[in-house]
Image (cartoon, rainbow, N blue to C red):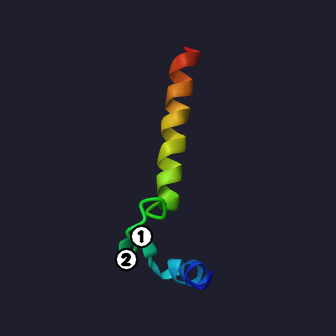
């Protein structure tokens, strides 16, 4: 719980625990979600045509 809190505070300064953790589930950034959402939107637009 403490590392999660520290990451939340330090992420403002660009810190990412994924650089120091071997767990692949944690190696995920907020911009990855934006990228995936954009891909989903593009695929949805293709199917609507």
Side of 44 relative to 23 (left or right): right
Residue 3 x/y as whole percent: 55, 82
Q: Residue at x 37, y 69 (%)?
A: 22
Judging depth in this view, the residue of 38 and 1 nearest the camera is 1
Q: Residue at x 53, y 51 (%)?
A: 33
Q: Quadrant of the N terminus?
A: bottom right
Dot 2: within a 10 Å radius of its alpha carbon, few (fewer than 14), some, or many (20 or more) residues?
Answer: few
Judging depth in this view, the residue of 19 and 23 nearest the camera is 23
Dot 1: within a 10 Å radius of its alpha carbon, few (fewer than 14), some, or many (20 or more) residues?
Answer: some
Q: What label does residue 35 carry, if any?
A: none
Residue 17 x/y as whole percent: 45, 75
Q: Which residue is mark 1?
A: 18
Vertically, is 46 above or below 12? above
Q: Residue at x 50, y 20 (%)?
A: 46
Q: What label does residue 20 carry, if any?
A: 2
Total numbered badges shown on the rendered structure: 2
Judging depth in this view, the residue of 7 and 41 nearest the camera is 7
Q: Quadrant of the C terminus?
A: top right
Vertically, is 33 above or below 18? above
* Image-quadrant location for residue 19: bottom left
Residue 37 x/y as whole percent: 55, 42
Most distant residue in the top direction? 49
Disc 1 from disc 2: Cα separation? 5 Å
Vertically, is 6 above or below 48? below
Residue 26 x/y as whole percent: 48, 64
Task: Tell me if label 1 and label 2 are in contact, CB under 8 Å.
Answer: yes
Q: Secondary structure at mark 1?
A: helix
Judging depth in this view, the residue of 22 and 12 nearest the camera is 22
Side of 9 relative to 23 (left or right): right
Q: Secondary structure at mark 2?
A: loop
């Amino acid at each position: 719980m403490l590392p999660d809190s520290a990451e939340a505070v330090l992420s403002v300064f660009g810190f990412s625990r994924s650089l120091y953790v071997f767990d692949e589930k944690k190696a995920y950034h907020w911009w990855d979600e934006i990228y995936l959402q954009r891909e989903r939107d593009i695929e949805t637009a293709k199917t609507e045509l």
